[in-house]
Image: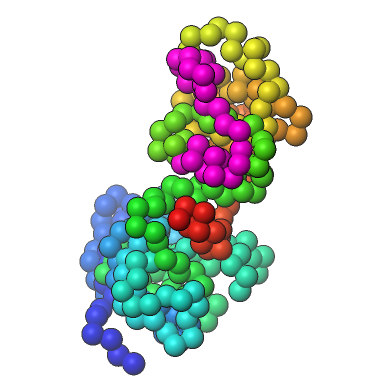
Amino acid sequence: MATNYKFEGWLGLDKSSSEGNMEWGKFEPKFWEESGVDIKVTHSGICSSETPYPICVGHDIVGRAVRVGSKAEGNIKVGDRVGPCSDGLEAYCTKGAVHTFGGFHYDGGKSMGGHATYHRAPSHFVFKVPGSLNSGGISIYSPLRFHGSPGKRVSVIGVGGLGHFAILFAKAMGADKVGISRSRTDEYIAAGEDSGWAENHLRSLDIVICTVSSNKAPFREYLGLLGLDGVFIQMGLPDFEAAQCIPTTFCGYSPSSIREMGRLSS
């Protein structure tokens, strides 16, 4: 069935697009299926990506559902504020993950991003977006859920945007929480005022969430705060030399974990 709207967006036609040479134009979305959803885009993020050309980039897409297939999942209705992100764990699929843009859907259709008027996605990648919930929340929610929080002593380094989410989610999950700040309060470790803070709190924490990216951050001292089987979650991105003392694993997320976060938030 034909639609009365067009799929248009900022297209990168070749490598010069990384220098700002983008062109506005039409593109073909993935094939329509009755399990799909069309979204009129209102918000879209971007990150550094290496993709085949031509491509319409843009991830973390938010908009209003304008077309919903008869077999769509998730109780999505036309007009819902939504975002796209077989078990809800497709991002981990060993047979090939489906990326928001720069890849291919299982039906062979090319995936195109959100720097566009409209976006078409499989309904199981689409979820309702609570009115004021910010995208950054899932970055914190997923590792807290993965590593378990109830009853654990969780510390947050850097109480900005992500750190604020970390405190809220840790509290909601039943964790004991403590911040690390430059000044002393009852609920903060005073890293700026107390010269012996690292020794005084040695091996006292179960989970440390670090949202700072400064190369001057005392990462070795932060790691010393962890007890047996403790977990250090690094959200900031310092230079490699500053962070090379941190053994790493990667903890991602999926549409199902985003829906779960939405339920907790509401």
Task: Inspect this view and state whether residue 184 appears.
Answer: yes
User: Which one is nearer the viewer's eye here, 18 or 116?
Assistant: 116
The quadrant holding residue 155 is: top right
Placement of the C terminus among the 4 image quadrants: bottom left
Is 240 positioned to the left or the right of 111 in the image?
Answer: right
User: Which one is nearer the viewer's eye here, 16 or 132?
Assistant: 132
Is 199 positioned to the left or the right of 257 in the image?
Answer: right
Task: State how the image is colored.
Answer: rainbow
The quadrant holding residue 204 is: top right
Q: Position of residue 215 (x, y in %)?
A: 49, 23
State yes or no: residue 5 in magenta: no
Q: Position of residue 150 (x, y in %)?
A: 65, 42
Query: Residue at left 23%, top 66%?
Result: 24
State yes or no: residue 177 in magenta: yes
Query: Residue at left 50%, top 37%?
Result: 167
The magenta segment = 165-191
- Residue 143, placed above or below residue 74: above
